[in-house]
Amino acid sequence: MQVTQDSFMQEPPQDWRRYFSFCTDHKVIGIQYLVTSFVLYLVGGFLAMLIRAELMTADADVLVNADGDPSLYNGVFTVHATIMIFLWLIPALGGFANFLIPLMIGAEDMAFPRINAVAFWMIPPGAVILLSSFLFGAPGAGWTAYPPLSLQSPVNGDGVAMFPMGMTLWLVSVIILGTSSILGSLNFLTTIWEMRIKDMGIWQMPLFCWSMLATSIIQMLATPVLTGALILLGLDLLAGTTFFNPTGGGNPVLYQHMFWFYSHPAVYIMILPAFGMISEILPVHARKPIFGYRAIAISSMSIALLGFIVWAHHMFTSGTPEWLRIFFMITSMIIAVPTGIKVFSWLATIWGGKIRFTSAMLFAMGFVSMFVVGGLSGVMLASVPVDIHVHDTYFVVAHLHYVLFGGSVFAVYAGIYHWFPKMTGRFLNEFWGKVHFWLTFIGFNLCFLPMHKLGLMGMPRRVANYDPAFVDLNMIVSVGGFLLGISTLPFVVNAAYSWIKGAKSPANPWQGLTLEWTTASPPPVENFERPPVLTCGPYDYGHADHPDAVVNH
Amino acid sequence: MQTSNEPLFNATATTETAEHESATAVHHGHPDHRLFGFTLFLISEGMLFVGLFVAYLAFRAVATEWPPEGLPELEFTLPFINTLILISSSFVIHQAEGLIKKNDIQGVRLWLGITAFMGAVFLAGQAYEYSIFLSEGFTLQSGLYGGTFYVLTGFHGLHVLIGLIMILTVLARSLKPGHYSAQKHFGIQAASLYWHFVDVVWIVLFLLLYVAR
Amino acid sequence: MNAVTFRIIGVVTGLAVIAISVWYGTNGGWLLPVEGSTEAALIDQLFRAMLVISTIIFLGVQGTILYSAFAFGKKKGDETDALPEHGNVNLEVFWTAVPSALVLWLSVYSYDVTNQVVAVGASGGLGCSVDCPMILQNTAATTGKELVINVIAQQYGWTFQYPGSKEEVGEMRVPKGREVYLNMVSKDVIHAFWVPQFRLKQDVIPGRITRLKFTATTPGEYPLVCAELCGAYHGAMRSNVFVDEPAEFDRWAETELGIKTAQQTQNLLAQK
């Protein structure tokens, strides 16, 4: 109790309130993003538990209304996906970017602090609007919202069509969140490009900044196309146009093209920052320079650029003509090359290191291990004939969760354990961190590994009822899912407790070499007491000639 | 959504915070990034139009009948005059941008005023075209032909309107003595850049909709 | 451990990984349902090839991580950094070139399978094509020997129309060994025709006709699954496809549909 009071005494009394205000400090905004998105992650995770509860049996019996209509189930998985993408991963990674970019490049804030705050404050209304759709009959067309299904008005008990409130709220919410993401990206790009300290050239930039540069380019160029598609969809829904409505001569497949033109790159928006964080964390805890710095930096950029010409691999069964399918198959497969370069470079980074098995490092190594699985199934999905079999099945669900959970979420956890001391000035408890890791790792594989087989054997995704032959595997998946739910508990308690009472952290608890570790934990409002100076590269571990070096050979 | 953001950029740029920000800029010695950020924003905004244009081309390419029977062909003369007005207004606002660098605030006000007037004429012309079409029963709901026409021109018109508001705001601020100077005139630059952007979008739109119909 | 021993262990481990991967990959059949069509056999072979490669990479990566975890952990009391190794051009070229070659080979192989399936299905890549004036069409003209079935999808069921019969039936039966040609339409939203045992899937899109071709090889009863989210009861939109012996199929067509495809199927197959 004494410690708590002390810590509050030293800071302005209204201190905690700044997290609930229109604050323009990038560090506050970063934490606002992280906490908000984590709360929404718990909501999305709760929805996932509901999905797994429904799928414990082959019949639709949990998320159904009195008539046995499983519309609610569709609403739950639609909102689950929308939350996890637009309200958890994109803003959570944006939170890290906000907190870290100015610190890593030695700037005192973002280029446009107010726009930064506006971008954040669009998230809570977006979330409220999305979640409120449950009050009006949630949108049930999946997060992809393919027309004409998304254009079908819900029908009330008397068979009369009602106003499509759920779908409308979904559209408004996603458009708001997309705009927020665009505003964020403008800030990241300008800050990284224009505000590095003088002696930091692009090849001295930490790799996280490289990955955010790549990510921001995608956000800036791809998100508006989604907005365009959603506006046209909204007009179809509300204003009686027929852009995507075949009954009026519209083209539903065009929507898919516009949607995936954003939504495939959106996968890279959710994984590239994670790549960047892993590239930061592995060298620090392995006490070894990142292996192949330039190759990793260039591969981030090439993934971002290639990401713009692969979208139709989501549409191999949509009647896409043969030559297009072949084109998109080849481009999609090529993406495996820069991704592979990263994975192999990470392995070479830890190889021969002096690994400190902190929770951050465990999650980072878990990331590499799990992401590879998602990468390999990704190559299979890029192949036209194999994709034709497994498209829209649980194989795809497994793949995307290995990339976005085994990948991005593991990276977010790694990032939290790694930078929590910098953000709060206190350590997270390591013991409970490791408990958290192993629960997550086991729950994750239990949940998503069997899905590969389910998909290959013939279970389509987005179903409330399925072939009873799949019950056993689904039961394992559900158990894994609930374990994943439980795995967040030690983390939540650990984070809340440590923030208030955790052991105090020095400025550089992990002996890192990037600039954020040269300032106090937590950093002062202006970030650096004196203008920071680059004394060594971001990953020069093991060199005797830098001041922070812990060398002894 | 997209559109509601420009004034914000403008606000951060030119309101009373400008003094404060320039003061801190001097203090910490980092330069003004607003033009860089604004340009990125316009590129992003441009992608929205690219998306809509590509959608239009995709509809157009598979349409067997364009315009479908019973719907009017697009008139050429009025939009052509409108195009000339909008393109010339881009040169007009360029004058204003040039003059502020010579600290000629009177000239800036004059040329901004003319640009605003030309923009208003363009919008009036557009409104007139709409009113004729609507009276002929050619509406947003008239299939893909009507839908694409109204969405493309409507979105562009909305951007012209926002540009017009920006110009008028800048004009109003230029009345305050010393608000803009040869060294400090981001507002004018931004308004001008935005106006060029609106212009370029219109040229593509005009070629697609009216010329290559 | 001296360098020679180290190399020997490395080579042996590598060979073991490859051997395990080849064994696992080629026995990947337990992951897949029965091969019910000629197309399925080709696609499965490709899948097994990918499974072999994936297993090698999987074991290699996980093995490296586990080995590193055991071999390169920080020793107690050792607070020093590891040796500064920033990269190795040869190694980096190697792990850029090999995956590039692999994915190119896989692309070519996948393309080849696509085409072979076309050869089996007469024309029309993987048997799927779509009516749309904008795109290059697979003018997959029927040779007259195929069994052409119209498939009608709507929320939440499938109906089928056989040549010579105006009736829409709720049961899909196809003869073994005869090429089947599906013309598919949807009455409402997008559905997808998927028979896992045939390994073939094609979206059924309102406002246009999509096509699918296959030749069933193994008699039996297979699930027909809607694979594109189509509404609340999407999961319940399941039906069956029965693959019959030709004579059996002919009998069914004659008695149930009242059409004389009977002679046709048997005769056509005899002609081959």
Image (spheres, rainbow, N blue to C red):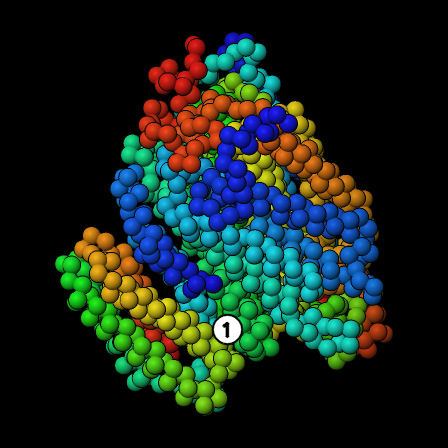
Label tally:
1
- Splitting the image into 4 quarters, where does residue B83 fall? bottom left
Q: Does residue A211 appear anywhere in the picture?
A: yes
Q: Position of residue C22 (x, y in %)?
A: 64, 33
Q: Position of residue A150 (x, y in %)?
A: 62, 66
Query: Residue extending furthest right?
Result: C255
Q: Is residue A504 above or below residue A208?
A: above
Q: Is residue A373 left or right of residue A262?
A: right
C42 or C32: nearer the eye?
Answer: C32
Chain letter for mark 1 = C
Q: Does residue A44 appear to the left or right of A101 in the view shown?
A: right
Residue visible at 52% across and 11% down in the picture: C78
| Secondary structure of residue under mark 1 | loop
Residue A310 appears in the picture as rendered: no
Quadrant of residue B170 within the rendered picture: bottom left
Which of the 4 image quarters holds residue A372? top right
Q: Quadrant of the C terminus of chain B?
A: bottom left
Residue C113 on image: x %, y %: 58, 51
According to the picture, the residue beneath numbered tag 1 turns out to be C133
Q: Residue at x 73, y 77 (%)?
A: A160
Residue at horizontal 30%, vertical 79%? B121
The image position of residue B18, as x and y in percent, is 31, 52
Residue at coordinates 43% horizontally, 63% vertically from top-left? B4
Q: Is residue A479 left or right of residue C56?
A: right
**Mark 1 is on which residue type?**
Pro
Q: Residues within 10 Å of mark 1 (few under 14, many from 20)?
A: few
Left or right side of B141 for A391: right
| Nearer to me, A267 or A158 | A158
